[in-house]
Image (cartoon, helix red, strand yellow):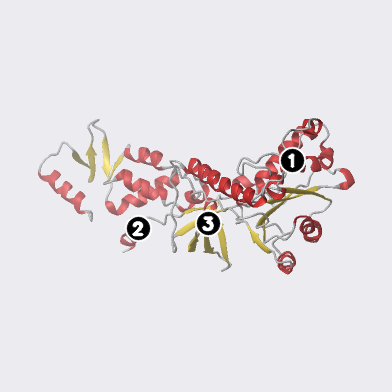
Amino acid sequence: REDIRINQIINRTYSKPDKYFTLVNNLLYAVGRDNRHRIMIPDIMKHQLTKETHIYLGHVGTFKVYNALKHNHQFKNMYAVVKKVTRSCDLCQKSKINTQITRGPTITSIPSEPRNLISLDLMGPLPRGQLNMKYILALIDIFSKHVKLYALRRATTNIILKKVLGDYLPKFGPIQRILTDNGTQFNNSRWKEQLEQNGIKAIFTTTYHPESNPVERTNREIGRMLRAYCHHQHTNWVKWLETIEYWLNHTTHHSTGLTPHQILTGKMIKLPIDKLIKLPDKEEHEDKEYLIQLARKNLLCNADKRNRIKDKGKKFPIYSANQQILVKEHRPSSAMDGEIHKFFLLYRGPFTIKEVLPNNTVIIKEENHRKNVYNMKNIKLYVPPDPGEQEEQEKQQN
């Protein structure tokens, strides 16, 4: 009786029969074209009814809740109300797979010259190979694409530092920055201090976003080559590392249009047949500065082309400070605790964005009051409860 619209229809029905509405046991029903009676739900109850139906049916989506309600019920803006209630369900937002694009526009950072940025990563543990080796340490110069591979018995901070500072630097010269993931071997004070003492800045990829480390793509190519040559005997991988390194450094990289060896030395690869035949042209070293300029031009051009193709027709989310978001969960299974990864909620939160950074990342403050950086691929916008639902609850309490 508190609903003005329903009250008006009831009064009109009392005074004059209406083919579209009827009263049965003092309840108002709408009569459809199919002659089906649908009970009229007051505005004060529509959000609560929708929420209860959504929960009763197992947190299904808008389409299923709407079709369940419209069969026997009617209220104003039914589909819009159902959509708002289901979209703002806290449990659904955290448990359902997000089918929308979550990443930001593709951004490619191109160093200005060789040895400006070295990307480092570990592969392993692998089958124990020659000399009990179990890991591959891969370093790639992001500009020239030059690759250096080391076989390691153990992957500790000290062992990796020994390879970088004791072998890589003396062979290839000083470097400015090293990019790694957030593994325990790298995200520690000793790693940062030792690099800093050698004039190298340690930088890190964002959490749970390995794509931001370019060495991951090189790792896939290394894996392809190892499959091709070690599929019969997996422990032979150590013997092939030097050869794989040679192949990677002496073949033309699609993004630079040059070989890594050519960019660093100015020399082209000599095939076996070239050693047998004396070519009429005199062997000359190409100007390294010219090759660096050419590589830079090709890198920028190809990166722009790739990014345009990758982003064509895509609609990316836009975030701003003070927005509420959910963060993707990455909890592992635990046989001891009787827990499986598939049964955990997919997201946690909500959290508030403190700052949006230009490299498709955001800074948020979590429960521990620590500020953490996340790539946009690992977050999604949080939809707070529908205000209409809160108003209903307040009116019902009053």
How far, Cα to Cα, is label 1 from label 2? 77 Å
**Residue 162 figure quarter:** bottom right
| Picture quarter with the N terminus | bottom left
Mark whose residue sits in front, 1 or 3? 1
Residue ID for mark 2: 387
Is 258 situated left or right of 74 in this image? Answer: right
Q: Quadrant of the C terminus?
A: bottom left
Q: What residue lies at 68% left-to-right and 42% top-to-bottom?
A: 259
Kindly identify the residue that appears in the image at 21 percent across and 49 percent down: 6
User: Which residue was labeled with disc 1?
Assistant: 283
The percent coordinates of residue 327 (x first, y second) are 54, 55
Lateral position of residue 255 relative to residue 170, left or right: left
Q: Determine whether the residue tagged by mark 2 lies in a helix, strand or loop.
A: helix
Q: CA distance from mark 2 to mark 3?
A: 34 Å
Q: Residues within 10 Å of mark 1 (few under 14, many from 20)?
A: few
Residue 299: image location, x then y, percent: 58, 47
Relative to the observer, which residue lies in front, 271 or 44? 271
Residue 136 lies, in percent from the top left, at 77, 48
Image quarter of residue 367: bottom right
| Mark sitting earlier along the chain (2/3) | 3
Q: Which residue is mark 3?
A: 359
Please tell me whether residue 56 is drawn above or below residue 199 in the rendered image: above
